Image: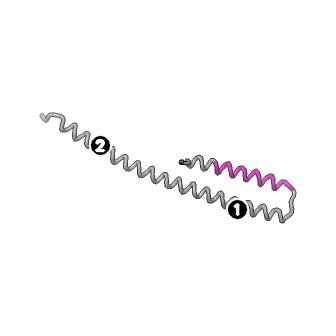
């Protein structure tokens, strides 16, 4: 099962939006300084997890891009070879004058 980079980034964006909404709700609630420290620690952990997910998505994108470039180069070589063979056959099929 292949997950596209766009899908991964959309999920990441959705997770960030949910995180922001949660943080906003919690900040609006009355709490003590200890609660803020806990919340900041939780947010730091979430941020680290999301950053790791983004890094993984970017690495996957780089891998997919490199693979696509390699395939493109190979296809170009195949096309050149086929065109060369076809040109040789056209030249051999025509009578010389």
Residue 91 appears left or right of 43: left
Is residue 57 rendered magenta in the image? no
Q: What residue is at 77 percent from the left and 55 percent from the top? A: 23
Residue 48: percent from the left, percent from the top? 66, 61
Residue 90: percent from the left, percent from the top? 22, 37
Secondary structure type for disc 1: helix
Secondary structure type for disc 2: helix
Whichever of callouts 2 and 1 sits on the residue coming sooner in the sequence is: 1
Separation of residues labelled 2 and 1 (CA atoms): 55 Å
Q: What residue is at 54 percent from the left and 48 percent from the top? A: 1
Which residue does the numbered mark 1 point to in the structure image?
45
Outermost residue on the left side: it is 97
Tally the numbered discs.
2
Which residue does the numbered mark 2 point to in the structure image?
82
**Which range is magenta?**
11-29
Residue 84: percent from the left, percent from the top? 26, 43
Residue 61 appears left or right of 92: right
Please identify the quarter of the rendering in which residue 83 is found: top left
Residue 85 appears left or right of 17: left
Callout 1: 10 Å neighbours few (<14), some, many (20+)? few
Residue 13: percent from the left, percent from the top? 66, 49
Q: Main secondary structure of the magenta part?
A: helix
Callout 2: 10 Å neighbours few (<14), some, many (20+)? few
Please identify the quarter of the rendering in which residue 54 is found: bottom right
Q: What residue is at 33 percent from the left and 46 percent from the top? A: 78
Which mark is on residue 56?
Answer: none
């Amino acid at each position: 099962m292949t997950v596209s980079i766009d899908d991964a980034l959309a999920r990441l964006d959705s997770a960030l939006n949910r995180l922001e909404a949660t943080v906003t709700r919690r900040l609006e609630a009355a709490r003590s300084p200890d609660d803020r420290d806990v919340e900041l620690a939780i947010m730091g952990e979430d941020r680290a997890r999301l950053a790791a997910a983004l890094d993984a998505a970017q690495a996957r994108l780089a891998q997919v891009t490199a693979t696509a470039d390699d395939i493109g180069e190979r296809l170009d070589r195949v096309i050149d070879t086929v065109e060369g063979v076809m040109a040789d056959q056209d030249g051999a099929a025509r009578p010389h004058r």
